[in-house]
Amino acid sequence: MYGTETAYDQLPNLPIKGRGSISNRVGRFERQDRVAIDDGWRSLTGETERPKLRTTLSVDTSKKVITYNQSPDVPFDRSINPYRGCEHGCVYCFARPSHAYWGLSAGLDFESKLFHKPDAPEILAKELSKKGYKPGPIALGANTDPYQPVERDQQLTRRILEVLAEFKHPFSIITKSDLVLRDLDIIAPMAKQGLASVAVSVTTLDRKLANRLEPRACTPSKRLEAIHELSKAGVPVTTLVAPIIPAINDHEIEAILQAVTRAGALSAGYVLLRLPREIDDLFCEWLDAYAPDRKDRVLSLIEECREGKRYRSFWGKRMTGSGVYADMIKQRFRLARKRLGLDQRHWQLDCSQFTVPPQVGDQMSLL
């Protein structure tokens, strides 16, 4: 009846097939929040999952391509990220909170509302050509994967690699996609000159778990195949067992390292699960949906590794944690890596070959 108030129950968030986040929580910079309420239709229809979510791709108008950092926790001081947001949908992705700066959610928005830099190769060429530029290894994919699904059509990462090859500029690639094999014609020749390496992330060997943690990333078997093909082509490959999640995939450490060694990886590293900002709530929702019986145990172990908190951002500890459980993970990883010979092979990318190619209109040298 008109003028009466009706009380509605808040709808529980349901998984969307092919997506990692369960919800689309409002970004931390927004002034208003929103929730879905049950008007009765869901109970009548028996709906158990939401409709598929369409991916959109917008233009990022950033004026620069190379991002610099001074973090002691990463082995590079500069990176390029052709895409903002990532369709792989990894629920644990540490890059999710960055979407809040766009007024978007770190949840479903992060994996469905993507941005790309179509003129990135041209901007990169200008940055590398500047007087006084000093070369250093560039990491592609330090934030979001340069070989996520939209790259098949956009070929933005490939065009960036073509520029780096033209300048003989060293680079490393971080990915969990076998699409990297498409660009072997660029990567392999540069690797033979000491100018390229690839890191492949392997979170689990369990295809069912991978499908829930990383719904649109390629399967574990395809990642192992990518390691094999890269290695066979002479590209130095390292493996990142990342993230290690207590009581979810930590039992797989030795098996993963053994599998990537057989595939041809030369070294390996790991990262303990990080839950900064919005990722904490998103990961708890994921546990409610897929591992409710283990939720308390998982969170308890995470807090044990983070000095009683869900996350601590201290330099030198944020990647590996601290405490008894974290030390156990560290020792297991160290011993397995040593036994498999993954701790004896190191390589340095060569910056001495960097050269700025002549541009149209340049005056020719008199030498």
Image (spheres, helix red, strand yellow):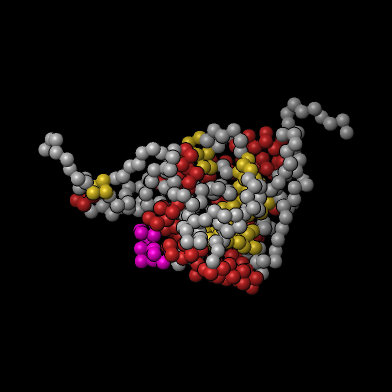
**Magenta region includes residue 46:** no
- Is residue 187 visible in this depiction of the protein? no
> Considering only vertical position in the picture, is 308 above or below 49?
below
Q: Position of residue 325 (x, y in %)?
A: 52, 68
Residue at the extreme right: 367
The residue under the point 62% across, 62% down is: 268
Main structural element of the magenta stretch: helix, strand or loop?
A: helix
Q: Position of residue 245 (x, y in %)?
A: 48, 62
Residue at the extreme left: 1
Foreground residue, 38 or 226? 38
Residue 92 vs residue 263: left or right?
A: left
Foreground residue, 234 or 90? 90
The residue under the point 42% across, 42% down is: 27
Q: Position of residue 261 (x, y in %)?
A: 61, 67
- For the C terminus, the quadrant is top right
- Is residue 103 visible in this depiction of the protein? yes
Q: Which residues are magenta?
A: 286-298
The residue under the point 47% across, 38% down is: 102
Residue 185 vs residue 363: left or right?
A: left
For residue 176, which quarter of the picture?
A: bottom right
Foreground residue, 2 or 290? 2
Residue 261 vs residue 303: left or right?
A: right
Q: Position of residue 365 (x, y in %)?
A: 84, 31
> Considering only vertical position in the picture, is 300 above or below 142?
below
> Considering only vertical position in the picture, is 123 above or below 87?
above
